[in-house]
Amino acid sequence: MATSLGPTYGAALVGIVIEGTLFGVTLLQTYEYYKSYPSDSIRLKSLVAVLTVLDTLHLILCARTLYWYLISSFGQFDVLDQITWSMALQTDCNGLIGVAVQLFFARRLWMMSRNWILTILISILGTIHFALGVVFTVQSFILGRFSAFASLTWVTCTGLGSAAAGDILIALSMVYYLQKKRTGIQSTDSIVTTLMLYSINTGLLTSILATASVILFAIMPTNFIWLAFFWIMGKCYVNSLLASLNSRESLRNKVHSSSAVEMSRFRKDSSMLGKKQTHSGALAVAIETTTEYRTDFDSSHKSASPEYKRQWSPTSSAIEVIEKDRLGVVAL
């Protein structure tokens, strides 16, 4: 293990400071979620609760780890190469968070695309990430020293590489299927563009952090620079999911606002068309607009009244907004 504390516990200290800051964002988003969406399904609320608990537990384990090395074992330089139990277990917390978030977005992607192969592939990549995280934990207890971490290069690189591949695949697939929903209608395309940006932001940061962790561990397995990126990655997973859930209200308002603008334009155009028809009397124009929303909201809402469904907007996942205009011209 490196003798300098800078690239080891110094890097870990920087990582936990950033992690603590992001944890504050997690708590804020969790509070905002339960406050803004009390009617969400029990399953979705439970997922948010479990992720928040795991995120809290991970920060506690990381804080306990640094306290043990830097405070409790101060001056005992031989201890700095030993692996304490909290250092080994924190890996599994991040692994659980990662696989839960990736499975959530895999389900959302399946609802949009109905592509089983793509959904299963993402689920497998997330599972590999978690499973190899467990292997890393077990091997950490067996090895007992950081100086032996070089033997775990394949475990770490494969696990974090699978996480990065899954995140990139989710983002690219979301963008691809949302792109296919473009209709040429400005209001609809604006919402689709917003959803595409959300999808890119969902997977971009976590995939960058996972890739950085892989490269740094492969190059420098005995220092903790890679660990700082790994600690931050877990917080980004949780916040990406919470941001996706909390953005539904703003998307719903955008849908309503766009609908109001389109209706105003339609009335104006209809009025002008009516005046033209008094002179020509040749054509009648019928415009029918149908808006379809697909969400991952609780299935209990399927039995809701038609009026409720008509007023419903993508407040669950906002994964797909389809607006189709059919213009018919009939000779009188």
Image: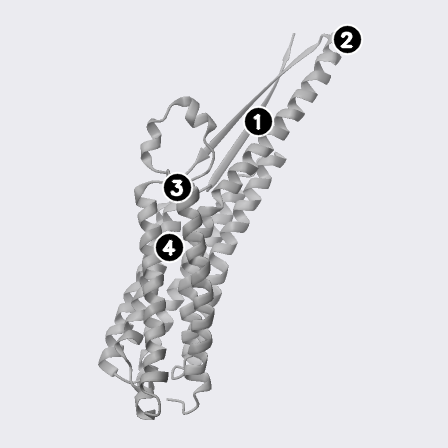
Q: Mark 1 and 3 residues: CB-CB less than 8 Å, in contact? A: no
Identify the disc placed on residue 111. Answer: 3
- Which amino acid type is marked by label 3? Met
Residue appearing at x 47%, y 69% in the figure: 18
CA–CA distance in space, label 4 to label 1: 35 Å
- Which amino acid type is marked by label 4? Val
Residue 125, percent from left and from top: 35, 60
Q: Mark 2 and 1 residues: CB-CB less than 8 Å, in contact? A: no
Judged from the image, the secondary structure of the residue bearing numbered disc 3 is helix
CA–CA distance in space, label 1 to label 3: 23 Å
Residue assigned mark 4: 101
**How many residues crowd mark 1 within 10 Å: few (<14), some (14–19), many (20+)?**
few
Identify the disc placed on residue 325. Answer: 1
Say whether disc 4 or disc 3 marks the residue closer to the N-terminus. Answer: 4
Judged from the image, the secondary structure of the residue bearing numbered disc 4 is helix
**Residue 153 falls in which quadrant of the image?**
bottom left
Residue appearing at x 37%, y 55% in the figure: 101
**Residue 1 falls in which quadrant of the image?**
bottom left
Residue appearing at x 70%, y 13% in the figure: 274
Q: Is residue 266 above or below residue 244?
A: above
Residue assigned mark 2: 279
**How many residues crowd mark 2 within 10 Å: few (<14), some (14–19), many (20+)?**
few
Disc 4 versus disc 1: nearer the observer: 4
Left or right: where 84 falls relative to 164: left
**Residue 36 falls in which quadrant of the image?**
top left
* Between 190 and 236, the one nearer to me in the picture: 236
Q: Mark 4 and 3 residues: CB-CB less than 8 Å, in contact? A: no
Q: Is residue 240 above or below residue 88?
A: above
